[in-house]
Amino acid sequence: MLILIDDADPKAIEDTLSFLPVDGVTTNPAILARYGADPLATLKRIKEILPFGSQMHAQLVSTTTEGMLAEAAALRETLGEHIFVKVPVTREGYAAMPLLKQRGFYITATGIHSAMQGFMAAKAGCRYIAPYVNRMDNYGISGVRVAADMHRMLRAQGIQSDVLAASFKNSEQVLELVRDGIGAITAAPDVLAHLVSNPATDMAIHEQNADFAGLVGGPMTWADLVAATGEK
Ligand code: G3P
């Protein structure tokens, strides 16, 4: 399963990359606006930061099919052929998907709020389909259940697309989808950090290290102890 960072702040991305096994970055127009800098320069900077082979997803903002095709071409020209273009599941977006696929683009369908929207986007050639989990929850629909249904639909139909679940607000939503075996999730740096942080862990490790310091007479590490023996 791929884990992606849903953010555009290069510092936050670097911080997440420094300690978590993540596979790339997704952005959308609102995320870029929240960061506030020139959006094209921001995408270029993110590309520089990401390790080779990482995914980068950028969302098209045109509201016409022709405009989407032109934007996708411009993005590929500037950011390289491995860029994933995020295409909204609007009427114009669905029309653009097979055309983009014919032109060899990697496509992520975005803004998905129902299983059938996702299924049709996969059928139209999208590599990933991105349900908005928390936003569905806010409408009283279980986003996790819809995302899991989509995953089952894809596998039952033998379609080689994957669910890239997005819009998470907590670890539990992510956990349930990991359990269901979906292909990818994208979440903000704070949600990703909470996947691994636990105050009980910090307390347990602190207590163990305090006991060890008591044993060796101070806050010494194994390296200190080996050095103290004079052995190499
Ligand atoms: O990238 C799209 C998705 O993550 C939107 O999330 O937080 O605006 O619901 P949010």
Image (spheres, grey):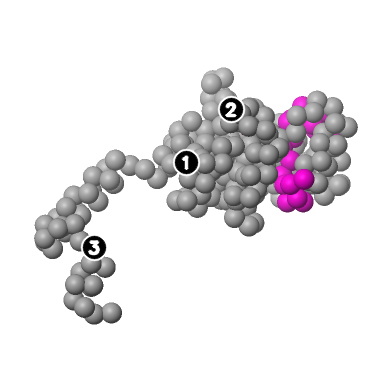
Q: Secondary structure at mark 3?
A: loop
- Is residue 85 in the magenta section? yes
What residue is disc 1 on?
192
- Mark 2 and mark 3 lie on one chain; the one further toward the N terminus is 2
Q: Nearer the viewer, residue 72 or 149?
A: 72
In terms of image quadrants, where is residue 220? bottom left
Camera sees residue 176: no
Around disc 2, counting alpha carbons within 10 Å, would you say few (fewer than 14), some (14 to 19), or many (20 or more)?
A: few
Instruction: Indicate the position of residue 224 as horizontal and vertical percent values.
Output: 23, 67
Q: Are marks 1 and 2 in contact (CB under 8 Å)?
A: no
The three-letter amino acid code for the residue at tag 1 is Leu
> Is 221 located above or below residue 31 in the figure?
below
Task: Mark 1 vs mark 3: give the one in front.
Answer: 3
Is the residue indicated by label 3 positioned so its CB lies within 8 Å of ligand 1?
no
The three-letter amino acid code for the residue at tag 3 is Thr
The mark found on residue 227 in the picture is none
Instruction: Indicate the position of residue 203 as horizontal and vertical percent values.
Output: 23, 45
How far apart are labels 1 and 2 at the CA level?
18 Å
Around disc 3, counting alpha carbons within 10 Å, would you say few (fewer than 14), some (14 to 19), or many (20 or more)?
A: few
Q: Nearer the viewer, residue 131 or 213?
A: 213
Q: Residue at x 67, y 29 (%)?
A: 29
What residue is disc 2 on?
34
Q: Nearer the viewer, residue 61 or 46?
A: 46
How far apart are labels 2 and 3 at the CA level?
43 Å
Q: Secondary structure at mark 1?
A: helix
Q: Look at the image and tell me in which quarter the C terminus lies.
A: bottom left
- Mark 1 and mark 2 lie on one chain; the one further toward the N terminus is 2
Q: Which residues are magenta?
A: 78-96
The three-letter amino acid code for the residue at tag 2 is Arg
- Is residue 5 in the magenta section? no
What residue is disc 3 on?
221
